[in-house]
């Protein structure tokens, strides 16, 4: 269908967040599978496929809204990227403070799994959303 209007920045930001969320879900599911195969980590009460799908989509949609809000500022794209890179660092530092299990091995594996998922979500949010917003031919 041929549209005769250009989408607004808000709609492009939301669609970019949704598309980035789908990309993040795919990468995170592959990461989860590979991580569990390599380490034989089997606990899945917290981090499982449902968690990965919902959290990645919600994080990326929220990041799309944040991109819209930051883009209203002078040099907003740069500030947005710096903000999400700082969030990645804080999130990973927080992930390494979690106490998930009494077993030290399971605790370390959970921290690495969770911080890897956070790293993927953060990098996708920081770099793919601005790219998708400025290249709206991808989804229109």
Image (cartoon, rainbow, N blue to C red):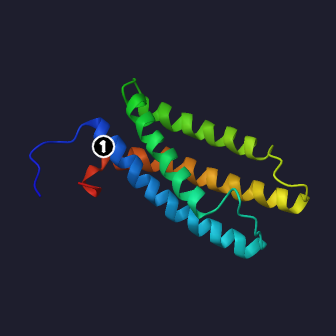
* Percent x, y of residue 55: 55, 50
* Percent x, y of residue 69: 40, 29
Which residue is found at the position 33% from the left and 48% from the top? 15
* Percent x, y of residue 19: 39, 54
Task: Report which residue position mark 1 lands on.
Answer: 12
Is residue 89 rendered to the left or right of residue 55?
Answer: right
Number of numbered discs: 1
**Quadrant housing the C terminus:** bottom left
**Quadrant housing the N terminus:** bottom left
Q: Is residue 89 above or below residue 118?
A: above
59 and 100: which one is in front? 100
Q: Secondary structure at mark 1?
A: helix
Which residue is found at the position 62% from the left and 66% from the top? 31
Q: Is residue 101 above or below residue 79?
A: below
Q: Would you identify the image quadrant in which residue 85 lies?
A: top right
Which residue is found at the position 69% from the left and 69% from the top? 35
Which residue is found at the position 52% from the left and 45% from the top? 59
Is residue 44 rendered to the left or right of residue 103?
Answer: left
**Residue farthest toward the top in the current orientation of the protein:** 74
Q: Would you identify the image quadrant in which residue 11 lies?
A: top left
Is residue 113 rendered to the left or right of residue 61?
Answer: right
* Percent x, y of residue 120: 58, 54
């Amino acid at each position: 269908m041929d549209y005769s209007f250009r989408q607004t920045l808000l709609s492009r930001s939301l669609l970019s967040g949704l598309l980035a969320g789908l990309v993040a879900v795919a990468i995170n599911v592959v990461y989860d599978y590979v991580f569990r195969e390599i380490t034989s980590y089997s606990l899945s009460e917290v981090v499982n496929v449902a968690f990965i799908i919902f959290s990645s989509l919600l994080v990326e949609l929220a990041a799309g809204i944040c991109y819209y809000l930051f883009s209203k500022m002078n040099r907003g794209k740069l500030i947005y990227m710096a903000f999400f890179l700082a969030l990645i660092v804080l999130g990973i530092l927080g992930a390494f403070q979690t106490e998930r299990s009494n077993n030290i091995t399971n605790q370390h594996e959970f921290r690495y799994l969770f911080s890897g998922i956070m790293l993927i979500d953060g990098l996708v949010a920081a770099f793919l959303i601005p790219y998708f917003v400025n290249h709206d031919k991808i989804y229109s």
